Image (tube, rainbow, N blue to C red):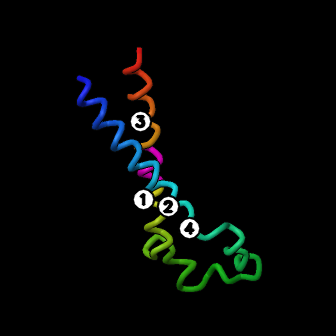
Amino acid sequence: MEILRIVVTIVFIIICIALTGLVLMQEGKSAGLGAISGMAETYWGKNKGRSMEGALVKITKFLAVAFIVLAAILNISRF
């Protein structure tokens, strides 16, 4: 059981580092201010989910859920 806890802790640390890197790689919301002037209807505005930025957002959401689940598991195992 102790080995499993160590493995989960190592995976948790790797997810923490990856999540931090992904958040820093993403563009800020202020970069999307072109929508005010009507630029949201461009090719990139319509296909944002298929772009690199869309992939980063999807991976970030997945890692955030994994982070929360692993944090809960590690916290429960302490009791």
Tell me the quadrant of the picture where the C terminus can be found: top left
Residue 48 within the segment the image draws in magenta: no
By secondary structure, the bulk of the magenta-drawn segment is best described as helix
- Binning the other alpha carbons within 10 Å of mark 1 as few (below 14), some (14 to 19) or many (20 upward) gives some
Residue placed under numbered mark 2 in the picture: 21
| 27 relative to 60, above or below | below
CA–CA distance in space, label 1 to label 3: 15 Å
Indicate the amino acid at tag 4. Answer: Gln
Q: Nearer the viewer, residue 60 or 48?
A: 60
CA–CA distance in space, label 4 to label 1: 11 Å
CA–CA distance in space, label 2 to label 3: 19 Å
N-term-proximal mark, 2 vs 4: 2
Task: Identify the residue at horizontal 34%, vertical 44% (top origin).
Answer: 11
Q: Which SS class for mark 2?
A: helix
Q: Nearer the viewer, residue 43 or 17?
A: 17
Q: Please say if the residues under marks 4 and 3 sit with CB atoms less than 8 Å apart.
A: no
Indicate the amino acid at tag 1. Answer: Ile
Q: Foreground mark, 2 or 3?
A: 2
- Binning the other alpha carbons within 10 Å of mark 2 as few (below 14), some (14 to 19) or many (20 upward) gives few
Q: Foreground mark, 1 or 2?
A: 2
Indicate the amino acid at tag 3. Answer: Val
Residue placed under numbered mark 1 in the picture: 59
Q: Horizontal and vertical percent for residue 52?
A: 45, 74
| 72 relative to 17, above or below | above
CA–CA distance in space, label 2 to label 4: 9 Å
Of all residues, the one furthest to the right in this rendering is 37
Residue placed under numbered mark 3 in the picture: 69
Span shown in magenta: 61-65
Residue placed under numbered mark 4 in the picture: 26
Left or right side of 54 for 41: right
Task: Identify the residue at horizontal 30%, vertical 29% (top origin).
Answer: 5
